[in-house]
Amino acid sequence: MAGAKPAVLLKEYLIYLKMLLRTIILLLLSTAVQAGDSLHVIKSIPMQSRMMTVDELGNVYVVRNDNSLVRFTEQGDSSAFYRSIQNGDIGQVDASNPLRVVVYYPSYSRVVLLDKMLSPKNELDLKKLNIYTTAFVAAASDGDLWVYDLFNARLIKVNDQLQISTQSNDLRQQVDKVPGPSFIVERNRKVYVCDTAEGIYTFDQYGSYINTLSIYGVQYLQVVGSQLVYRNGDHLISYDMQTVKTKELQLPGSKIVNAAISRDVLYVLYADRLVLYKVVSRK
């Protein structure tokens, strides 16, 4: 980064190393998502919320009913806050890269990019791409942005100036039914587009369609190595794409909005609280 001080660059580098280490640990511990494990409450935080996601550092991001975005550490301590009333309600949050959090506002077709302190650093108007209907977005590993254009049935990749670097063919010519996404995520040079009714559509790093996995009802997806981790009712499911084996973790309580796991911490968002659990394996 031009003009950046050495101390700042070192700090950024250490953050990336920490992200890499946590990803490796999460890979090793992902088999903990199965019956027989025990859960111990780390912290329960009362709140009225409707959306949650996690990053690779163990932070959890919650969209509260007042449209504010709050970040908590894996100990349950609030560490950053963001709120804007200019673009309507938050529709999606992608914290794959905690240094560049993606927030999408469907009502105005706008994407706001936040820095590591959840301060706005850029804003993109998808209407400049002729996207006026609800789209779905996800962070790309190279710093670009994946956008699924529902109206034109295309997956496109753009940079911060909304210049298109790659895009899929018209999916209406490739699949029996085009995706009506509930969630999008990129991992390991693949893009996963979740459709609750049709399954999980997979694309390569160039936006080319690969296949559709017969996994239904997925509204939030984590990809850890070869494993797909998602919630199905009151269970957290881990599906291994290589072994085609499934493991389950029973989620406690009811009225669950979302659930995710990072390292050995399970995050469960309920209608009235966020609860962080320590996962203790009984192996």
Image: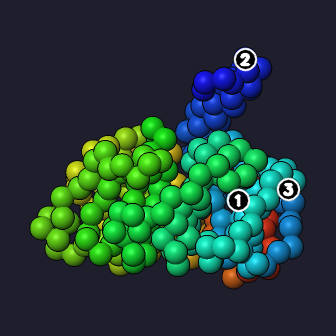
Q: Residues within 10 Å of mark 3 (few under 14, many from 20)?
A: some
* Tag 2 and tag 3, C-beta contact below 8 Å: no
Name above or below for residue 46 compared with residue 129: below
Q: Residue at x 34, y 69 (%)?
A: 130
In the rendered image, which quarter contains the N terminus? top right
Q: What residue did someone put label 2 on? A: 6
Mark 3, secondary structure of its residue: strand
The circle drawn on residue 255 is none
Image spot of residue 261 (x, y percent): 64, 54
Q: Residue at x 63, y 60 (%)?
A: 53
Image spot of residue 82 (x, y percent): 75, 61
Nearer the viewer's eye, disc 1 or disc 2? 2
Q: Quadrant of residue 89?
A: bottom right
Amino acid type assigned to the residue bearing label 2 in the image:
Pro
Looking at the image, residue 277 sits to the left or right of residue 113; the answer is: right
- In space, the residues marked 1 and 2 are separated at their CA atoms by 29 Å
Amino acid type assigned to the residue bearing label 1 in the image:
Tyr
Looking at the image, residue 2 sits to the left or right of residue 170; the answer is: right
